[in-house]
Image (cartoon, rainbow, N blue to C red):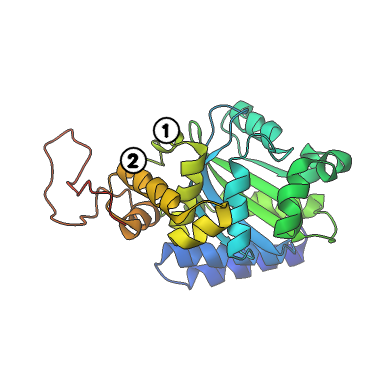
Amino acid sequence: MVSEESVRTIVRLLGDVAGVGSDVHAKKRRFMSGLAEMVDADAWAWVVGSVSDPEQPPVYLNFMQDGFDDQGVGIIMESSQDLENRSPESEPLMREIIESGGNHITRTRRDMVSDDGWYDSAHFKMYRTRMGVDDFIYSVFPMSEGIFSAVGLHRKLGRGAFDARERRLAHILVSEVKWLHFEGVPEDKGQDLPELSPRLRTVFALLLEGWTRKQMAQHLGLSVNTIAEYTKAVYRHFDVNGQKPLIRRFRVGNGYDMPIHTPTIKAAGSRGLSRSKSGGA
């Protein structure tokens, strides 16, 4: 059951969020930070992604977080595309999302993976220990067929597991705050993303986080020249000419309602505004 104290905390949080103003990203950050405080989480992440095959990694369109440093963000992106060392909850969670019939689901780690299955996994040893996080709540909200909005709430290594009450609080809030999922998301919801290779998806996600080529090269153990080629491939794929236009497309709008150069509208039935196809840095 949700206590009166929890209800009061929810009301205060929603009031605080309403006072943030019209900046949707600031509103989301305030909401997510408040939700994390409510369930005593040390870090949080919010993503919009797509999934069509539970045996394949999800594809992330939007990503926002707090509580992870740059290295932690890089590890999140890298690990999400590692098919050989997938997180043990990934396949059952993806399968449940696909089979849920469009229903919102919220699960703790222990709902999906036993303690032995979690702590003995290569994923935990390779990635979670480096990030310094352990237990989690995942709350996944369907937006359209194959597209979902997901909240992750995490606790540091050595802390206790999330309980049923905390899972319920997260589920109620993520269910009822619809703007969290739909505002500030490109209209195409990243339908082109599955065409990218896992490595390019990682580079794409780090570009959205503002990482430089040098940072990506150091984190991924690749040369700056290799990262430059990957970066240009991402820009060509999304028909943008640099990192700022890429961020603007995926953080502000669908990209085709925001002219980068000349606001010349193409003929009816085209994809949108004309833009440079150069693969600039």
The front one of 175 and 25 is: 25
- Where does the image place residue 39, in percent across and percent down from the top left? 73, 61
Label 2 is placed on what type of residue?
His
Residue 1 in sight in this render: no
Circle 2 SS class: helix
Mark 1 crowdedness (10 Å alpha carbons): few <14, some 14-19, many ≥20: few
Q: Is residue 22 above or below residue 194?
A: below
Residue 19: image tag: none
Residue 195 is tagged as 1
Give the residue type at disc 1.
Glu
Q: Is residue 196 left or right of residue 102?
A: left
Sequence-first tag of 1 and 2: 1
Q: Are marks 1 and 2 in contact (CB under 8 Å)?
A: yes
Point out residue 52 in the picture as x, y percentages from the top left corner.
Answer: 53, 28
Where is residue 71 drawn, in percent x and y? 61, 61
Q: Name the image quarter holding residue 66.
A: bottom right
- Horizontal relation, residue 245 to residue 90: left or right: left
Q: Please tell me which residue is depicted at 69% across the width and 67% down the height of the picture.
A: 37
